Amino acid sequence: MKSINKFLLHSSACLLLMVLGVSCLKDDDYDEGKENININKSIKLVEIMGPIEGFYTKSLDYSTGDTTVQLVNLNLAALDPAPEDLKVTLAVDPAVIADFNARNDENFTPLPASYFNFPTMDATIPKGQREAVLSGTIKNPSFLESGKYALGMKVANVSNPDIKISGNYGQQLISLRVKNKYHGLYHAAGVFHHPTAGDRDIDEEKELTTEEPNSVLAPLGDLGGAGYQMLLIINADNSVTIEPRGVTPNIDQHWGRNYYDPATKSFHLHYSYNTSAPRIVEEVITRE
């Protein structure tokens, strides 16, 4: 999968372009860093808001009943807002999942049709506005507790023929998860030991998000905003295994014990990254 830092740089550029009224068209030369972006103010595109990788996650509360959730956010990337009510028709397409799996060596499974329902596949961007939402119902979300299920969504049609479907953002894979018991807001306190810049305190809020029933994705130290992430895997004895995610090159856990305390709902972590010049992190991440 493309590195998170490339995604952050590209999505920041795209955000700026959307403010200017354009979007990022599919351009292999740009993806390879060979070309600059050409801004064409006459371009009008409808896109599904999400990462350029074409993948985002919706985490649902555990339930055996039906859960209605906003699944797709649409955006009109143009110099001006919608000139009239724009009807955007979406479609569920398993080919989106198959393509993503092939490109990224993943194994997402299409969510069976019996587990979701869309009252309509049409969403309307109102005149004078830029955004619309498509909601759907997930039946018995507890089903999602195991397995890697997803919906492949794409823009199938726009009512105004002058407005095109985005090349980069015309489709997205939506990973569907049930929030595990570790998912939530936490406060992190500790110290970041830098080999040349010295020590600095860690004192910040962190959101830990579900990956699997026994694992959560977390920002690394105080570097989450720079794309450094880590996967915390809670083992049966409450020890914690840490794996690198995002742009984190490696994780070394030999510095001390890493464990989860269920009584205080806190992660006690002591680890480092960067083999040649270790950046050592000691932090306690406690549920708020």
Image (cartoon, rainbow, N blue to C red):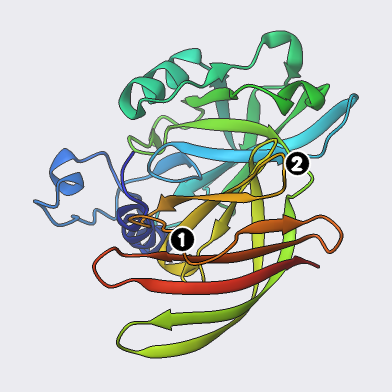
Q: Is there any visible trace of residue 243 in the rendered image?
A: yes
Categorize mark 1 by other alpha carbons within 10 Å: few (<14), some (14-19), many (20+). Answer: few
Residue lying furthest right:
65
Identify the residue under disc 2.
180
* Viewer-nearest of discs 1 and 2: 1
Residue 59 location in percent, x, y? Answer: 69, 40
The residue lying at 47 percent from left, 20 percent from top is 107
**Residue 117: percent from the left, percent from the top?**
75, 18
Q: Amino acid at mark 1?
A: His
Question: Cβ–Cβ below 8 Å for labels 1 and 2?
Answer: no
Of residues 161 and 136, the one nearer the viewer is 136
Nearer-the-camera pick, 274 or 46 = 274
Look at the picture and state if 286 lies above or below 59: below
Q: Which residue in the structure is indicated by mark 1?
A: 254
Name the quadrant containing residue 202. bottom right
Which of the 4 image quadrants contains residue 15? Answer: bottom left
Q: Which amino acid type is marked by label 2?
A: Asn
> As drawn, which residue projects farthest toward the left?
34
Point out the image quarter for the N terminus: top left
Q: Is residue 128 left or right of residue 237?
A: left
Tell me: residue 82, above or below residue 212.
Answer: below
71 vs 68, left or right, is left
